[in-house]
Structure formats: C-alpha cells, structure tokens
Amino acid sequence: MASHDLRNQRVQTQFNINVEAQPSPDPAVLLNQGIQSLDVKSYQQSINFFNDAIKANPLIAYAYYYLALALLRGRRPKILKRSEIEEIDQLLATATAMGDFDATVYWFRALVRYDYYVGNGMNCPSPSIESILEFIRPGETNIDRLRALLVKLPMTGNQMYMELVNQIN
C-alpha cells in the first residue's frame, strides 16, 4: 500500500461565487395581481399580493385600501370580529393619511364603521363617522371606483350604504 505525505504540498483552489441580488418585485405588478385575485374572490392570494406590494413600496396608498377590502373576504363588516374591523380600519386610516387617492377611501372607512358599530348597536370610537365624511368634498369621489367598491361590499339593509347607492345611480 502506498503512502502519500501531502504536508509540504500547496493546493491552490479558486472559488468563484456569483451572488446576484434578486430584483425587487415591482409593487405596481403586485398591486395589479392582487386586484385580479380579489376580482375572482381569491382572498388569501390577494392578501398576499397586497402585503408584498406594501413591503416593496409602503407608500402606495391603494395597496392599503385594497388590502382592507381583501380582508373583508366578501363578508359584511357587521359580522366580523372587532379585531378584524380594527385592522381594516387601521389600513384605511393609513391610506387616508397618505392622501394619494380620491374620496372613495373615506366612503369605505365610513361604511365599514357604520355597518360594524351602528349595525351592532355600539358606540363608534374616534374618529366618528360624521368626521370622516367631513373630509369628502364635492367632486372628489371617483364615481366609477365608488360603484366598484359598493359592488364588493355586501351591505344590503345598511341605511348609509343604501342612501349612497341611491345617490350615485
């Protein structure tokens, strides 16, 4: 059996490590994918897309708006848990604070609060529904976007919802 003594030999090895950073996902693409998923009622998938869009660019107000809509999962706000309503409300508050949208976000927030708090005979925490509605100025609401929102909100029997539907039709 042959014996090899390698102590005095030098081994040169070169490693080429090519680390490429993954491109950041395009938040606009993620937002559009989320909207498409929401349109076909794939709620969890749309939630994932909207969360990813927010991670990619936390300054897109409509990502928060659509995430709030997706979190409803087609359910009426009145039947949700309070923690779910508070999460949805916080997302809509974030969207309104950014100011990059039409007044549909205010309508959405007021409708959700009205359906949950008034519909369940509870006092609405601050801000009141009336104070949210005070932010809406004539001509600031994109009627097509508001109609699309109302179609996605199952609130028959909600007085505020019905009055709004009658006003825009």
Image (cartoon, rainbow, N blue to C red):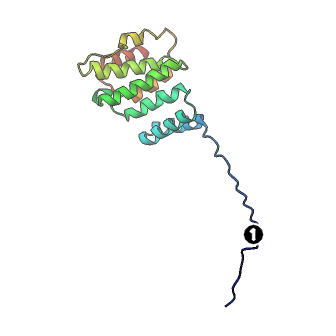
Quadrant hosting residue 163 = top left
Between 52 and 166, the one lying in front of the other is: 52
Residue 73 position within the rendered picture, expressed as x and y whole percent measured from the top left:
38, 35
For the point 32% across and 30% down, which residue is it? 83
Q: Is residue 9 visible?
A: yes
In this rendering, is residue 61 above or below 53? above
Image quadrant occupied by the C terminus? top left
For the point 69% across and 85% down, which residue is it? 3
For the point 34% across and 27% down, which residue is it? 85
- Pointer 1: what residue? 11
Between 48 and 144, the one lying in front of the other is: 48
Residue 40 position within the rendered picture, expressed as x and y whole percent measured from the top left:
45, 40
Image quadrant occupied by the N terminus? bottom right
In this rendering, is residue 36 above or below 138? below
Quadrant hosting residue 16 = bottom right
Q: Give, as a three-letter code, the residue at label 1.
A: Val
